[in-house]
Image (cartoon, helix red, strand yellow):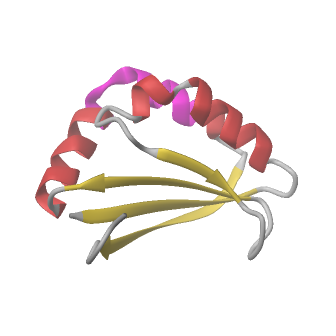
Amino acid sequence: MILVRNIFRCQYGKAGEVARVLAETRAVWDRAGGARLLTDLSGPFDTVVVEETTTSLDEYQRRLQEEFADPRIGEVFGRLAGLIASGSREYFTIEAAG
């Protein structure tokens, strides 16, 4: 199993707004179910993280293609325009859980 962590470094003071938009539009971006939406308690300020799991990188890429074919994703990113300074994506192999 693979953990995918999408990290959004938000404009100063905008993490709460980014988290609200993502929470409101969860049905659009959380097709696989089980994604977690996190905000910073430590580390870089104004950070929002979306974590989800996938069985393989191929499966994750397939889901991304499906999501970005959905016009509602464009609406979500339109709402986020100007709120995010930068972002990154990390992949981890889950060696043990629970």
x 74%, y 76%: residue: 43
Q: Position of residue 30 (x, y in %)?
A: 39, 35
Q: Position of residue 69 (x, y in %)?
A: 26, 30
Residue 57's place in the image compared with 14, above or below, is below
Which image quarter is the N terminus in? bottom left
Q: Nearer the viewer, residue 32 or 11?
A: 32
Residue 33's place in the image compared with 62, above or below, is above
Task: Say if the magenta span includes residue 37.
Answer: no
What segment carries the magenta color? 68-78
x 50%, y 47%: residue: 36
As drawn, is 78 to the left or to the right of 16?
Answer: left
Q: Position of residue 63 (x, y in %)?
A: 22, 42
Task: Say if the magenta span includes residue 73.
Answer: yes
For the stretch drawn in magenta, what is the main secondary structure? Answer: helix
Identify the residue at the far right of this view.
Answer: 13
Which image quarter is the C terminus in? bottom left
As drawn, is 95 to the left or to the right of 27?
Answer: left
Q: Quadrant of residue 93?
A: bottom left
The number of numbered discs placed on residues in the rendered structure image is 0
Residue 60's place in the image compared with 23, above or below, is below
Q: Quadrant of residue 19?
A: top right
Q: Position of residue 33 (x, y in %)?
A: 34, 35
x 77%, y 60%: residue: 46
